[in-house]
Every structure is written in structure tokens, then in C-alpha cells.
Amino acid sequence: VEIAHSWIGDLRIQLAGPNGVPAMLHNRTGSSTRDIHATYTLATTPAIAALLNQPAQGPWTLHVQDVAPRSNEPW
């Protein structure tokens, strides 16, 4: 996964397979670190186990959310 973002601690990333079952890949970790350059494996991301035995064919969806609270400050 390659994502350019100024504060990865604001991000949640989930992968959902054809059955719709999601696996959390990234959940607001990394604080103010910039950009994500990651390969997620079962060894590094145990949540991927939820994706095992799903069909390879069909829609796989990567959901990326910026969940930082909105600021009312004018920039």
C-alpha cells in the first residue's frame, strides 16, 4: 500500500474481500509520520486472518478514511 498523507495517525485502512468481511490494516498509528509505504502480511497484521478462505475472484475493496476531527480554523 502506497499512500501519500501528511499525518498517517489520522488514517484508518481496511481491506474487504468479496464476502464483505473487512480486515483492519492500519488504525491511526504512526502519529505525525508522513506517507504509508507498507506491505501487510499475516505475520505483521494478524487481522488479515479474517480474509483467509475468501474467494480470490470478485470485488476486493480498500477503504481509506481520514478520521481526524475537522478544525474550524481558517487556513
Image: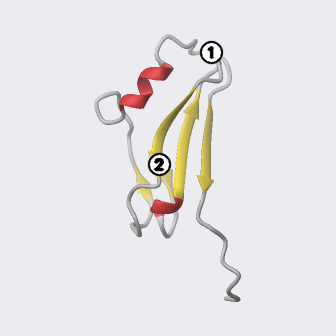
Q: Nearer the viewer, residue 66 or 39?
A: 66
Measure the alpha-carbon separation of dots 1 and 2. 26 Å
Write down the residue under mark 2: 27
Q: Earlier in the sequence, mark 1 or mark 2?
A: 2
Circle 1 Cα neighbour tier, 10 Å, few/some/many (<14 / 14–19 / ≥20): few
Can you give x and y, in whole percent of width and height, for residue 57 in the image?
62, 15
Q: Secondary structure at mark 1?
A: loop
Can you give x and y, in whole percent of width and height, for residue 67 in the image?
60, 58
Side of 59 relative to 40 (left or right): right
Circle 2 Cα neighbour tier, 10 Å, few/some/many (<14 / 14–19 / ≥20): some
Name the kind of residue labelled 2 in the image.
Answer: Asn
Q: Secondary structure at mark 2?
A: strand
Residue drawn at x 47%, y 48% is 27
Side of 74 relative to 4 (left or right): right
Write down the residue under mark 1: 57
| Residue 33 sits above or below residue 56 on the image | below
Name the kind of residue labelled 1 in the image.
Answer: Gln
- Outermost residue, bottom side: 74
Query: Can you tell which quarter of the image residue 18 is in?
Result: top right
Residue drawn at x 55%, y 34% is 15
Q: Nearer the viewer, residue 19 or 55?
A: 19
| Residue 19 sits above or below residue 65 on the image | above
Q: Nearer the viewer, residue 53 or 9?
A: 9
Side of 8 relative to 46 (left or right): right
| Residue 72 sits above or below residue 54 on the image | below
